[in-house]
Image (cartoon, grey):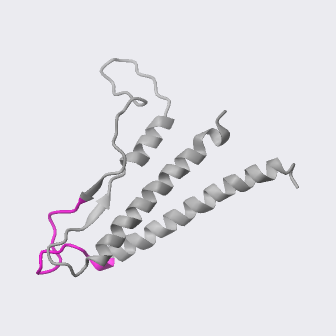
C-alpha cells in the first residue's frame, strides 16, 4: 500500500537534493578566498529521475525513449569551469553563492513544511479527526 501516492518519497528525494546542494554552496562560500578553488554545484538528475518515474507514458514506437527504465545516476556534484572572478584563478562569486544559498533554504523549508503537513494529516486520521 502506497500512502500519499508516493508523495512522501518524492518529497524525501527533493529534500536530499536540497541538502546536497546546500553542502556544495556552503563549501563554495567557505573557499571563496582559496587560490585555484573552482565552484561546485549539484546536478538535478535524481529529482528528474523521480519525476520521470511518476510519468505514465506509452511508447507507440520502439525507437521512442523509455520513461520508466531510464537509468540516471544519483546526485552528481560537478565543478564549474570556464569562469574566473578573482586573480587567483578562484571562480566563486560570493554574491551569486549567497543568493543561491537563500533560494535553496527557501526551497528546503517549503519541502519541510509540505512533508510536515502530510504527517500531520496522517496523525489527524489516526486520532480519528480529533
Residue 108 in percent (x, y) is at: 51, 63
Q: Quadrant of the C terminus?
A: bottom right
Residue 36 in percent (x, y) is at: 14, 73
Q: Main secondary structure of the magenta part?
A: loop
Residue at 80% x, 48% y is 125
Q: Quadrant of residue 20?
A: bottom left
> Position of 31 compared to 83: left or right?
right
> Position of 12 compared to 23: left or right?
right
Q: Quadrant of the N terminus?
A: top right
Q: Quadrant of residue 94?
A: bottom left
Numbered range of the magenta stretch: 79-95
Viewer-side residue, 99 vs 72: 72
Q: Is residue 109 magenta?
A: no
Number of numbered markers: 0
Residue 96 in percent (x, y) is at: 32, 74
Against 30, residue 5 (above or below) is above
Q: Quadrant of residue 70?
A: top left
Residue 81 in percent (x, y) is at: 17, 63
> Position of 15 compared to 80: left or right?
right
Residue at 46% x, 55% y is 16
Residue at 62% x, 57% y is 114
Viewer-side residue, 55 vs 115: 115
Residue at 74% x, 49% y is 122
Against 28, residue 7 (above or below) is above
Amino acid at each position: 500500500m502506497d500512502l500519499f501516492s508516493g508523495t512522501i518519497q518524492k518529497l524525501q528525494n527533493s529534500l536530499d537534493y536540497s541538502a546536497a546542494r546546500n553542502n556544495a554552496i556552503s563549501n563554495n562560500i567557505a573557499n571563496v578566498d582559496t587560490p585555484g578553488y573552482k565552484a561546485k554545484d549539484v546536478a538535478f538528475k535524481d529529482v528528474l529521475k523521480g519525476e520521470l518515474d511518476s510519468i505514465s507514458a506509452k511508447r507507440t514506437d520502439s525507437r521512442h525513449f523509455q520513461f520508466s527504465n531510464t537509468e540516471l545516476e544519483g546526485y552528481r556534484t560537478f565543478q564549474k569551469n570556464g569562469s574566473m572572478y578573482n586573480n587567483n584563478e578562484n571562480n566563486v562569486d560570493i554574491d551569486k553563492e549567497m543568493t543561491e544559498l537563500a533560494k535553496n533554504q527557501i526551497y528546503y523549508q517549503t519541502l519541510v513544511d509540505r512533508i510536515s503537513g502530510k504527517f500531520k494529516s496522517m496523525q489527524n486520521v489516526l486520532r480519528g479527526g480529533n
